[in-house]
Amino acid sequence: MTATTAARRTAIENDAMARAVELAETGPLAGGNPRVGCVLLDSDGRVLAVGRHRGAGTVHAEADALARVPPESRGALVGGTAVVTLEPCHHTGRTPPCSHALHAAGLARVVHAVADPDPRAAGGAQWLRAAGVDVSTAEEAGLDPVVVARARDVAASWATAVRRGRPWLVAKTATTLDGRVAATYGTSRWITSTESRAHAHTVRADVDAIVVGTGTLLADDPALTARTASGPADHQPLRVVVGERPVPPDARIRRGPGEWLHRPTRDLAAVLAELHDRGARHVLLEGGPTVLTAALQVGLVDELHAYVAPVLLGAGPGAVGDLGIRTIADALRWRTVRTQRLGDDLFLALRPEGES
Ligand SMILES: NC(=O)c1ccc[n+]([C@@H]2O[C@H](COP(=O)([O-])OP(=O)(O)OC[C@H]3O[C@@H](n4cnc5c(N)ncnc54)[C@H](OP(=O)(O)O)[C@@H]3O)[C@@H](O)[C@H]2O)c1
């Protein structure tokens, strides 16, 4: 291959990976399956079809893309390239292996960004290579590190949950400018803007479960359902209360839509393990400060959603309690992965520094 041809191929595959990431980002976080996007190119780099995975029980991104190739273009798959955010699967689950489908279609090359961490599904790249397909990781293909990082990001929560055997935990805080989550008398409604609260409901509608401590349940009597402007969201997370005190008989959480459960324990790791066993891969911790502090102390928080309102209280509980940190050198530091203006508030999505 000449240098010009190689550079052209890299540019085409880079654009295809960026498109695959965009497709993957539209997939659901809830349901226990990865978000995946796929772009199929002919041997000259023209896009034949794109596909994405829409969640558990639906076809994989590769199969979706293959099904969308117009009948008159199917021949052009021979010698073409599949660009996929996740390594093609190699197991027969609810759908047949994508490794076989790509090979059978005649594709000559596969570029994937993230290796499949699930031992039941991994091995697709190896099998395709053995079958004579030219398989490259995104790095090997020389794709832009920014695009590769976005592809990793889109799979991060699912891949981490699979590797660790516990759900990806997103902790939410809604604070004043001075970091308080409630006023001295316990009221916290509402610190944040209507836009922030609407955003928080879209996050609820995209997770498998929401966890709160009994303190929040007893102080706020939250319903913890996911709501849109026109009523309950289609997907309702499992609502979970953790703590030894009982849930009052008239608590709003007892009403629907969606299921709820109470675990009379303070062992958050055990509750997360149980949720993982029930298929949850993406869990939202909605407070309050006591359970958030406990989760941070044992390193359970994978992502932080901070809604910061331009409000000052000057007194009242802070978002996080004592973590035993006594010097700046020991501070827990976070990396900002996304920011958004929500009305007058600022939303920050953060990940622990040093982790993907
Ligand atoms: N602005 C916000 O983002 C936000 C969010 C949530 C809550 N809030 C506010 O926060 C206040 C409630 O705070 P909170 O800290 O009491 O709520 P919390 O963290 O939801 O609940 C604390 C309680 O949960 C139980 N618990 C469960 N796991 C625990 C663990 N690992 N370690 C210790 N305790 C555990 C304990 O009760 P048991 O004795 O029952 O075991 C504990 O007292 C309210 O004013 C509420 O409005 C604000």
Image: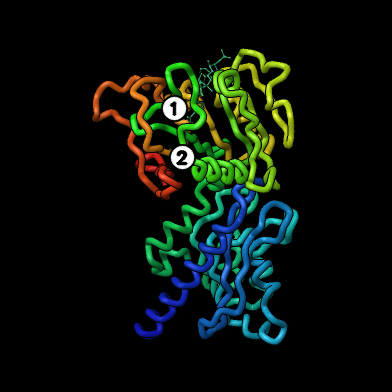
Residue 47 at x, y percent in the picture? 56, 79
Q: Which quarter of the figure has residue 146?
A: bottom left
Residue type, label 1:
Val
Quick one: which residue is furthest to the top in this view? Answer: 245
Classify mark 1: residues with Cα within 10 Å, few (<14), some (14-19) or many (20+).
many
Q: Which mark is residue 181?
A: 1
Residue 161 at x, y percent in the picture? 55, 41
Identify the residue shown where x is 53% and y is 61%: 85
Instruction: Please name whichever residue, 176 or 76, is drawn nearer the observer in this view of the structure.
Output: 176
Can I make out residue 298 in this image?
Answer: no
User: Tag 1's secondary structure?
Assistant: loop
User: Tag 2's secondary structure?
Assistant: strand
Name the residue tied to disc 2. Answer: 305
Residue type, label 2:
His
Question: Height in image: 34 above or below 224?
Answer: below
Identify the residue shown where x is 57% and y is 27%: 212
Identify the residue shown where x is 73% and y is 17%: 249
Can I make out residue 266 in this image?
Answer: yes
Rendered-image quadrant of the N terminus: bottom left
Instruction: Please name whichever residue, 286 or 177, is drawn nearer the observer in this view of the structure.
Output: 177
Tell whether circle 1 marks a residue whose Cβ is less than 8 angstroms from ligand 1.
yes
Classify mark 2: residues with Cα within 10 Å, few (<14), some (14-19) or many (20+).
many
Q: Which mark is residue 110?
A: none
